[in-house]
Image (cartoon, rainbow, N blue to C red):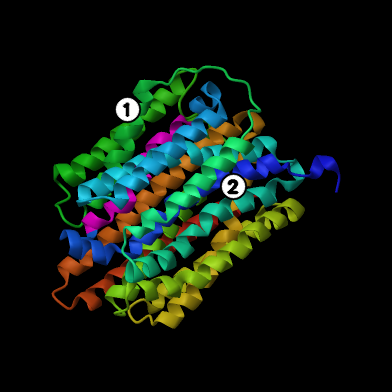
Amino acid sequence: MTTAEKIPRKVIAAVIATGLMSFCGVIVETSMNVTFPILMREYHISTDTVQWMTSIYLLVVAIVVPMSAVLKASFKTKTLFTVANLFFITGVVIDACALSFPMLLLGRAIQGFGTGIALPLMFNIIMEQVPTSKLGLMMGIGNLITGIAPAIGPTFGGIVASRLNWRWVFYILIPFLILSFCLGQWGILQKSPIRKQRLDMLSMLLIVALFTGFVNGCSNLSSRPFLSWSVGGSLLLGLLGMIGLIWRSLTIAQPVLKLSLFGNHSFAGHVLGFFLTQIISLGFAFLLPNYIQLVNGNDSMIAGLIVLPAGFAGAIFAPLGGRILDRFGARKPILFGMTLCLLSLVTFTMISRHMDNFWISFVYIFYMAGMGMCMGSVMTDALKVVGSQNSTQGNAIMNTLQQFAGAIGTSVVATIVAASQLGMHTAQAISTAVGTQHAFILLTILCLVTLFSYHRYVD
């Protein structure tokens, strides 16, 4: 290996530092999914209310990430990282000490600000500073850092909630965030020039309207009539925000999100599949732990242990997918990975009214393996399609949609399950199983659309 092909130690440290923050964000998200039944009892709230623990975080991240291209151009990378890390630590401390559910949501929102700033930094550092011959591998490792968390999170959350208290989910993260801070201060270097850019406030208001409207509307579908301000009014607000953002982005010289990139059909096809895959994955993270507890009658620790093997499968296949991309191109790891995901979803759909814990664990391994193999490759190939001059904007678009999709995915599947629980006059275990099957049918359809999009647009 030549010197040019080696990845500098400071680059590795910078990727780990920014990745650790994103990892902590997803760990909290998926750890707390396991504790939802505990929180529902403690705070006397419903299924569609408790899911805001996930949705509020993802919503804030989705609003902040679009600013990443402007922030990266206007401020030093290390400054952005420092601010992001301090935001996250503040949110974690608030949640650890929360006296009420609204206080929990406040802490999650503050964490969202931190992750929204930090998440794009990781991929920007990789695209700027990693040799081309190692790009697929490093993007795979970057996605591994954030991708393994959804499978480890339930186990971590289950053990902590059953042996200590759910608040320790937040306390335990503080040393990791301090480590992240130290690595970032040492490893993050400034490679691109600083050119101050003005943030278009009208675009930001439209982004807030778009994401808040859609997430709030989807969250309230099961508990309120469609023709109400909480559902129909929110969805209309989201639609108007989307139309306004598209218009604004296509008519100003320096848009917050360069939506004209969607004129590249190959990039649009990659992003569609990426968006739908995130909806599916966050839907999984909500459905399985709740099924194990509410239908199969296990505690949160057992729920976490059941999904843990899938986390290791995702960890193994993420860098493997990157290596295959570096050697053979993106098509093989993406299509093979998504085929595994589809087969897993079809299986879950067929057995979801009577899933024992062994089959949940076994089938979920194949889903996480497929997801781990394809996601880093999708992101790498999509950013290659738009070229290095647009990679920062492409990265901002994909990270924005990733978080938005997570919020929508959690809201939609929670709504489907909650609707079944409210609409069926039967035992909660039965109604939850039926609602879970309905949710899996929707996720399977989305996976079919994703596979078609990748087959059509990935070379």
Label 1: element kind: helix
Residue 99 placement, left or right of 132: left
Frontmost of labels 2 and 1 is 2
Tell me where residue 318 appears, x and y as whole percent: 61, 58
User: Which residue range is magenta in the image?
Assistant: 48-68
Say whether residue 22 is visible: no
**Camera-side residue of 379 and 453:** 379
Tell me where residue 270 appears, x and y as whole percent: 55, 46
The quadrant holding residue 11 is top right
Q: Amino acid at mark 1?
A: Leu
Q: Residue at x 56, y 44 (%)?
A: 17
Residue placed under numbered mark 1 in the picture: 205
Residue 49 is covered by the magenta coloring: yes
Tell me where residue 26 appears, x and y as whole percent: 44, 53
Tell me where residue 187 appears, x and y as whole percent: 63, 38
Which circle's residue, 2 or 1, is located before the other in the chain? 2
Q: Is residue 58 above or below residue 84?
A: below
Residue placed under numbered mark 2 in the picture: 16
Q: CA distance from mark 2 to mark 1?
A: 32 Å
Q: Amino acid at mark 2?
A: Ile
**Camera-side residue of 2 and 375:** 2
Q: Is residue 388 above or below residue 251?
A: below
Q: Residue at x 49, y 45 (%)?
A: 178
